[in-house]
Image (tube, coloured by chain):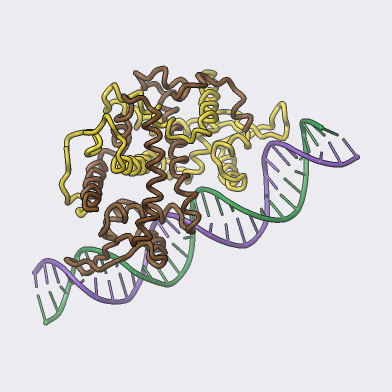
Chain colours: A yellow, B brown, C green, D purple
Amino acid sequence: MDELLARKIPEPNSVGAGSAAAHAAAVTSDGDALELVELFFFAYRDFVGDADRLLENYGFGRAHHRVLHFVNRRPGLTIAALLEILRITKQSLNRVLKQLLEAGFVDARAGVVDRRQRLLYPTPKGATLARDLSALQSARFLKVMDELPPASRGAASEFLFAMIDSGERERVRAHLACAKIAGAAT
Amino acid sequence: MDELLARKIPEPNSVGAGSAAAHAAAVTSDGDALELVELFFFAYRDFVGDADRLLENYGFGRAHHRVLHFVNRRPGLTIAALLEILRITKQSLNRVLKQLLEAGFVDARAGVVDRRQRLLYPTPKGATLARDLSALQSARFLKVMDELPPASRGAASEFLFAMIDSGERERVRAHLACAKIAGAAT
DNA sequence: AGATTTATGTCAATATAGTTGACGTAAATA
DNA sequence: TATTTACGTCAACTATATTGACATAAATCT
């Protein structure tokens, strides 16, 4: 750990990532792209770390988190839609979903229009946990927005959206629209 | 999958993520933070997906990728420094590192100043694979920068850096500085 | 010089999260 | 009626991580 800190540290009081802030206007060089790759790695690691610690108290892992999150965001979600979002197999989903159902964090009702479907809803307990988890992660974003110069704030969602495969963006946009409608009904 | 696309889709030709672009100036509401959480999830999923597909050809996984990446970025890295970066146990590292050593992608030499240390270097083959993998991920960033309005480009690294735990930022900054020095020597 | 600490390796058992493949069932649909 | 669809389930396997215990050689302290 000392080894990692032993070299010269540029701009120690700046918020920018080393040299990246210096060329803010033109992030196009190979070295800069490599830095972004690593920053993305570290940022994501810390981002999920918050939730991981809370989940430990419930004996749940990241897989449970993802399921609970999307069920809470889109109450009435079907198994098929959930599989589409998570991009895992039904066998893999089934294991964690079963645990969430048995532990009373998620509820499944037969579809009204198509009774083969199982519509997934968070229970009150599930909604509470989902909100606590989201609060942790939202808090990180809100703090970041606070630290960032106002001009950079709006860029975050544009940036993240642009990072998504272009073929996936419509789907993601549709998901966000669904979640927004569901959220408005609350 | 149709289910996901069945609802109304706002601003279908915009690059912005649904409503997020509209309030670009003030991303502070709960709903917006939730959208960022999900965008981060989807963006990271696609980001690592590129490399995953290439790694399959070599019988390697993400764990190998991370090791190879950091060894290539910081040739001469010690085991301890690598463990610090990856935040995994030595047992876990050892398994994938052994495979990389045996397959001839990484080389370990005894430290000169401290002969207990094993200094890790990429072999030519390892450096090539590392470069191919980085090229994929860098390409995504470069494409993103191209799609984004110029004013938003510099914000990406600031944003990602701010997303890192504040207690980790010094370490990350130091790592980037080390990598930069190593890169300059190339 | 001898004792201790450090850097690393290794064996073993376990957990989590994913996979493929095969098969079953009830409900919708052609 | 036949077929397809939405979902569940059993089984075996892989990848990646964990904890705990123990081993070794080199550096360092006293």
In front of the other: C8 or C1: C8
User: Measured from the top left, where is residue A114 in percent x and y?
Assistant: 72, 30
**Left or right position of B154 against A180:** left
Q: Give the residue at x 32% y 65%.
A: B107
* Residue B10 percent across, percent down from the top left: 52, 19
Q: Position of residue A125 (x, y in %)?
A: 51, 33
**How many callouts does the rendering have?**
0
Left or right: A25, with D20 as reference point = left
Residue for point 45% across, 48% down: B51
| Residue at 34% over, 62% down | B123
Residue A141 rendering spot, x and y as whole percentages:
35, 30
Task: Please name whichever residue, B135 or B174, is drawn nearer the observer in this view of the structure.
Answer: B135
- Residue in view at x 55 percent, y 36 percent: A85
- Judge whether B69 appears above or below A180 on screen: below
Is residue C26 shown left or right of residue B25? right
The image quadrant that residue A43 belongs to is: top left
Q: Relative to A146, is C18 above or below?
A: below
